[in-house]
Amino acid sequence: MSTLTAVRDLEDGPTDAELEALEAELPIVQAEAELLDVEISLLDQPAAPWSERRVRRAHREVLAARLKVANRTRLRKLAAGTGEVA
């Protein structure tokens, strides 16, 4: 890809496929942001029994979001008939 093409692509904005890919990963980004928020909020507090539970719960949400996105992506590939289900 030439520099000129790269600049033109930036001016045109993201393609529909790129926007769709970003939207598909949005649940992961939101869950990771929540986990980070929990971890930051606990930095300046003394350790409490519920602190560890909050972190575990937020971590489970991240894993659930990743699983959901991975399954959705896999189903899209199957529906498209690409044959690639890695």
Image (spheres, rainbow, N blue to C red):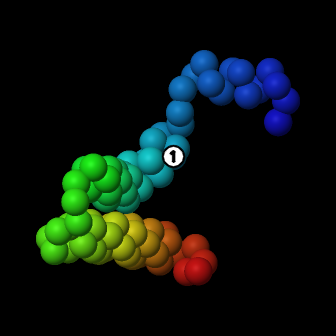
Dot 1 alpha-carbon crowd within 10 angstroms: few under 14, some 14 to 19, many 20 or more = few
Q: Position of residue 52 (x, y in %)?
A: 24, 72
- Give the residue at the far front of this rendering: 46
Q: Position of residue 13 (x, y in %)?
A: 54, 26
Q: Look at label 1 and name its amino acid.
A: Ala
Q: Residue at x 58, y 73 (%)?
A: 82
Q: Secondary structure at mark 1?
A: helix
**Residue 78 to residue 3: above or below:** below
Question: In this view of the protein, which residue sits in the foreground, 13 or 30?
Answer: 30
- Residue 7 in the figure: left or right of residue 56: right
Check the picture and name the quadrant holding the N terminus: top right
> How many numbered discs, if any?
1
**Residue 73 to residue 86: above or below:** above
Residue 79 can be seen, yes or no: no
Q: Quadrant of residue 6?
A: top right
- Residue 26 in the figure: left or right of residue 56: right
- Residue 52 in the figure: left or right of residue 49: right
Q: Position of residue 83 (x, y in %)?
A: 59, 80
Question: In this view of the protein, which residue sits in the foreground, 26 or 19?
Answer: 26
Q: Quadrant of residue 56?
A: bottom left
- Residue 69 in the figure: left or right of residue 10: left
Residue 40 can be seen, yes or no: yes
Check the picture and name the quadrant holding the C terminus: bottom right
Q: Residue at x 27, y 49 (%)?
A: 44
* Residue tagged 1: 17
- Give the residue at the far right of this rendering: 2
Q: Residue at x 82, y 25 (%)?
A: 3
Q: Residue at x 43, y 72 (%)?
A: 70
Question: In this view of the protein, which residue sits in the foreground, 70 or 64?
Answer: 64
